[in-house]
Image (cartoon, rainbow, N blue to C red):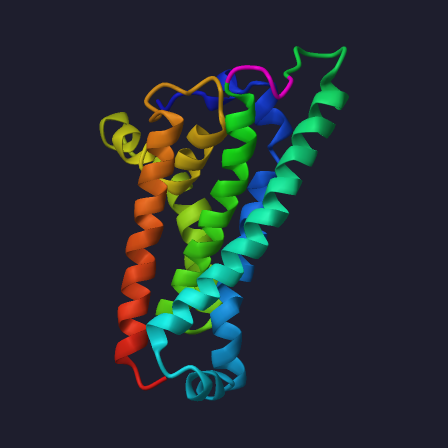
Amino acid sequence: HHPDRADHLDPLTRSLAGHFFAQFVVGVIGAMIITSEYSTGSIRNTLAAVPRRTLLVISKVIVLVTAIILTTEVLSFSMFLLGQAIFKGHIATFTLSTPGALRGVILCGVLLSLLALMGFSFGLILRRTPAAISLFVVMILVIPILVQFLPSSWGNPISRYLPNNLGEGMISINQAPGTFSPYVCLMVLALYVAALLAGGTVLFNQRDA
């Protein structure tokens, strides 16, 4: 009853398919930026060095985003160029000058950076690596599967707001029915992350450590 998204795969989406696995890697990295300090107890030393907790969060976010965006943009462009080279002669191929292709490749890196921030936010809220990673996997993988079992009248409206479908909308040229436009997908996902990060920062400021 949900749209068959396979029908809407294009050379861009196919070449960037590796982002599905990369999102779990960046989610784990994002969570462990903060949870590793709790697991080792070094968070107290960090807070002694940087007592202004909001400033500490901001500094970690800047370091995380800078590292992730540089890495994922290189990865995205590499996946695209390699994918098009593999597809050449087998299916239609794109170049970066194809309308929407450059946007999709760039937003793939942005998507992975936002997901790293989502993992970081879960780590900030839950403070435990297994819990943060589990929640990330539930959000990205489990909930979309469960929604597939809902009636269309419920499932389809919910699906368009799920992070996995927002991510697909950001990097696709051929939008699946019911999907927001790429930049609306970006805005909605960014709002999710901003809300989680703000909530995590508030909790971080209220706790002893």
User: Relative to 132, does residue 172 appear above or below in the rendering?
Assistant: above
Quarter in which the N terminus is drawn:
top left
The residue that appears at 42% across and 81% down in the rendered structure is 50
Query: What is the span of residues highlighted in magenta in the rendered image?
Result: 95-99
- Please indicate, yes or no, whether residue 139 appears anywhere in the rendered image: yes
Q: Nearer the viewer, residue 22 or 197?
A: 197
Magenta-span inclusion, residue 178: no
The image position of residue 80, as x and y in percent, is: 66, 29
The image position of residue 98, as x and y in percent, is: 57, 15
Residue 15 sits in quarter: top right
User: Relative to 123, does residue 137 appear above or below in the rendering?
Assistant: above
The residue that appears at 52% across and 15% down in the rendered structure is 99
Q: Nearer the viewer, residue 59 or 186?
A: 59
Tell whether 150 sits left or right of 15.
left
The image position of residue 100, as x and y in percent, is: 50, 20
Residue 54 sits in quarter: bottom left
Residue 149 sits in quarter: top left
The residue that appears at 46% across and 45% down in the rendered structure is 141
Report the magenta stretch's main SS: loop
Tell whether 98 sits left or right of 183.
right
Q: Nearer the viewer, residue 66 or 135?
A: 66
User: Relative to 163, does residue 53 appear above or below in the rendering?
Assistant: below
The image position of residue 203, as x and y in percent, is: 28, 72
